[in-house]
Amino acid sequence: MLETDLLPVKQRPSVAYTEATRAVEEDEEIRRMTEAELIEGINRLRKERHAVILAHNYQIPVIQDLADFVGDSLELSRQAAQTDAEVIVFCGVHFMAETAAILCPDKKVLIPDPEAGCSLAASVTAEQVRRWKEKHPDAIVVAYINTTAEVKAEVDYCCTSANAVKVVQALPPDREILFLPDMFLGAYVQRVTGRRMYLWPGECHVHAGIRPEDIQGLFERYPDADLLLHPECGCISQCMFALAEGELPADRTFIYSTSGMIRHVRNSSAPTHLVATEVGILHRMRKEAPHKQFVPVKEDAICEYMKTITLPKVYRALRDMVYEVRVPEDITQRARQAIERMLAIV
Ligand code: SF4
């Protein structure tokens, strides 16, 4: 059930020309460096700083290739929590670096561009969550990990697309559930678990832009392909309906988080995979299974926030130890509880 009488969805963060972009463009040393020199410099500095570089699956190829670990939000949170490194350079968007800072209060967490935002995280504020909870005082609040630290501090559980179903299934059956902020993921979880949930009307503009018409006719064009769909996609409800009606082949249509997609690509015998998520993941898939064909369902499904992280910015982050991500102590405590409750379930 969509809660549409709430405040309007907030505007997207801007990526027009960030402060970090200006800083690297005006930096004499960085301007003179070639790509090979930047990589060499990053490798030297990461040793000197005892730093680990974590990169999300949607990062540009050169960043994925130099990272110590590439993964989805959940995998990166786990890596951040386990690392012995003193510094974490988080190549992803801001809420992810905040999550690392929440889980590792004794480490320095750097993000190469602090304006790497997220349209989904920007679609709900802590104040909106407080108002929503007032309307449903007995409800359990579940927040997708794509939320700010302030929002996480207001909720009972976090979840990712990899574990949202398990988290909701673990909740007492007699309690109302408020699910935020992604309405497509929420609708998917509602359908799989059979739980009645109130859904926040938020969306990721990249995944919401993957529409049912992008799926139409794909199996005719690629008869030997598997279709991999991310549950944030705008086509997910229609695809689940089409699956139930037999209009999409159940043995070749799969709904996965990005980590689930990578596992599927490794293990499936299909020679072709149709991929419905942000196109950055295709680089990882091609490395995992170079003999297979990967076709983006929507070629321009590109997250401009993820792409603000570049080699010069990673070099500058390590050289100047910028930009540190800090979360106030009281917010850290409350947000960590919601994340740890999730990690206890999965
Ligand atoms: S792809 Fe969507 S959910 Fe992921 S970081 Fe970009 S805007 Fe946010």
Image (cartoon, helix red, strand yellow):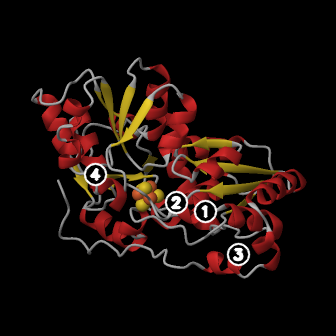
Q: Is mark 2 within 8 Å of ligand 1?
A: yes
Q: Are marks 2 and 3 in contact (CB under 8 Å)?
A: no
Tell me the quarter of the picture where residue 287 sits: top right
Residue 73 point in image, percent of width and height: 52, 47
- To which residue does mark 4 refer? 210
Q: Is residue 42 visible?
A: yes
Residue 79 point in image, percent of width and height: 66, 42
| Residue ID at (56%, 66%) | 308
| Residue ID at (54%, 29%) | 290
Category of crowding for the residue at label 1, using alpha-carbon neighbours closer than 10 angstroms: few (below 14), some (14–19), many (at least 20) = many
- To which residue does mark 1 refer? 309
Q: Nearer the viewer, residue 56 or 174?
A: 56
Distance from Cα at disc 2 to Cα at disc 4:
18 Å
Q: Is residue 270 left or right of residue 331?
A: left
Residue type beneath disc 3: Val
Instruction: Name the residue furthest top.
Output: 269
- To which residue does mark 2 refer? 306
Residue type beneath disc 2: Met
Distance from Cα at disc 3 to Cα at disc 1:
12 Å
